[in-house]
Amino acid sequence: MRTLFRWFVTYILPPLGAFFTVVILWHFATVIFDIKRYILPGPLLVAEAGVKNLGELWNGFLMTGAEAIVGFAASLCVGTLVACLFSQSPVIRRSLFPYAIFLQTVPIVAIAPLIVIWFGTGFQSVVLVSFIISLFPIITNATAGLLQVDPDLLDLFRLNNATRWQTLLKLRLPSAVPSIITGARIASGVAVIGAIVGEFFAGYVSRKGLGYLILQTAPQLKTDKLFATVIASTILGLTIFALVSLIGNLILNRWYDGEA
Amino acid sequence: MMISTDTAFIHADQVGLSFPGAPDVLAGVNFDIPKGQFVSIVGPSGCGKSSLLRVMSGLQTATAGQILLDGRSPGNARENNLRSAFVFQDPTLLPWRTVRSNVSLPFELRDRPPAEYRNHVRETIDLVGLTEHDADKRPRELSGGMRMRASLARALVTNPDLMLMDEPFAPLDDILRQQLNEEILRIWSDQKWTAVFITHNVSEAVFLSQRVLVMHPRPGRIAADLEIPFAYPRTSDLRATAEFAELIGQVSHELRRTVE
Ligand SMILES: Nc1ncnc2c1ncn2[C@@H]1O[C@H](COP(=O)(O)OP(=O)(O)OP(=O)(O)O)[C@@H](O)[C@H]1O
Ligand SMILES: [Mg+2]
């Protein structure tokens, strides 16, 4: 009970305090400077818009959440497999790594239209955008983890005539678990951004996702609803990040008895 | 005591080791070790003790001369069922595995069915002084001494013909080191593997071995070869005798000469 209280005071109270301070300042700023509601709606108006559109926002939350989670899961699997391939030889790494960097540097808004041309509008294309931009952090972190293995342990495996395959499965992959989890944490946030951007281009089929709502609401100058949608997107990002972190910590606890 | 080449279990003939662009690590290392002998190697830090052991294990290939284990090169011997076990300075355990499953690793890497080695693993864990309860713990839950015991068990479990040990007890406190010295001698008397034991602790070298090789640095070579005539079983009483002190004096003297 005491520890719960201390945890609340140290970790929950400060960000909560900051949050309310900003909301209050925001409220008085809109009142004192008499800012037009279509430029900057006050927090009360935003809350009102949120409640009024709760059903729509909730559906968007679920839609975008599903796209982000599928995109993230795909990049976790594919990224780890690619990293396993990279870990097998420096020649493979040198030949393919530049193309992995391409994933990181290509402006996603530039290739999103291409994806629409190739794969059409709809769920699969949104997922693809989310997948492409969340892949890089998994590849880099997993590759680093697979290569940073205690050299004595590698010697131990060599002395036991371990095959490449055994060394990968029984040594490299388990050693890389903490790095893969770090990569997954970064990728989870990016996957949500990818899903929202993807909906800008390919969300016209379901007409549900948060990205689609943002795109629809902005030109109508329903700034309060726009704000509410942005906040919903943020909550979605935080939720997925927290979920991935939680699962990651559970795995680390089981495997390493509490230490990463 | 001269041992002819054909009876020597380990035969080192003008062994040299060098890395490009660096002074020779080993040069002209010669010795013969008969089967079942307990030999310690002492020498100043950086003189090439670990390198010599790595050459004996086949982890590294000599760049000059040759080492023969039972008449074959170390790599060849390892592939032909000469069982050599290596004990590293650090326990080098897989942190995500329990002691039991760490000790089982050599069999797992040889694709043996668990039923075949389960009992033997249990007996070996018991032999090094760990309990059934310890066997189900992860390395992190064990003290440094217990981790070293687990590491010894993993080496002993293969019923080795040759035990190569690289300062295994260096990080342990004096009493624990003495205890483990006595235990390792008890196991050796029973199993009669050939032992090459590296240490920088002269008293440990004299207590354990039938023979102490003193290495000279830059490049690494054998400077002295001293016989330790005490009968086995050796008990801790031996440490209090004048003869023991006398031999420690002799080895220390040789060791001092290598750095002057
Ligand atoms: N891969 C390598 N490349 C270049 N030099 C190396 C390599 N491995 C070892 N050496 C050099 O070989 C020398 C001997 O190293 P080694 O670890 O065998 O010494 P050591 O006697 O075991 O020392 P210590 O008592 O500190 O463990 C050192 O000078 C080291 O720098
Ligand atoms: Mg060393």
Image: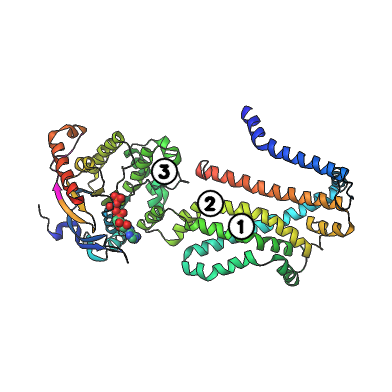
Amino acid type indicated by mark 3: Arg
Q: In which quarter of the image is ligand 1?
A: bottom left
> Considering only order in the chain, which callout, 1 or 2, is on the residue closer to the N terminus?
1
Asked if marks 3 and 1 fall on the same chain, the answer is no
Residue where numbered disc 2 is placed: A177
Amino acid type indicated by mark 2: Val
Report the chain holding disc 3. Answer: B
Percent position (x, y) of residue B175? 29, 33
Q: State the SS at label 2.
A: helix
Are circles 2 and 1 on residues that touch, CB within 8 Å?
A: no
Residue stretch rendered in magenta on the structure: B225-235
Residue where numbered disc 1 is placed: A76
- Whole-number angstrom distance, CA of label 3 to CA of label 1: 31 Å
Would residue B33 be visible to someone looking at this image? no
Would residue A186 be visible to someone looking at this image? yes
Q: State the SS at label 1.
A: helix
Residue where numbered disc 3 is placed: B100
Report the chain holding disc 1. Answer: A
Are circles 3 and 2 on residues that touch, CB within 8 Å?
A: no
Neighbours of disc 2 within 10 Å: few (<14), some (14-19), many (20+)? many
- Whole-number angstrom distance, CA of label 2 to CA of label 1: 12 Å
* The furthest residue to the left: B1
Report the chain holding disc 2. Answer: A
Q: Residue at x 73, y 58 (%)?
A: A195
Neighbours of disc 1 within 10 Å: few (<14), some (14-19), many (20+)? many
Out of A20 and A51, give the one closest to the viewer.
A20
Q: Which numbered dot is residue A3?
A: none
Percent position (x, y) of residue B121? 37, 44
**What is the quadrant of the N terminus of chain A in the image?**
top right
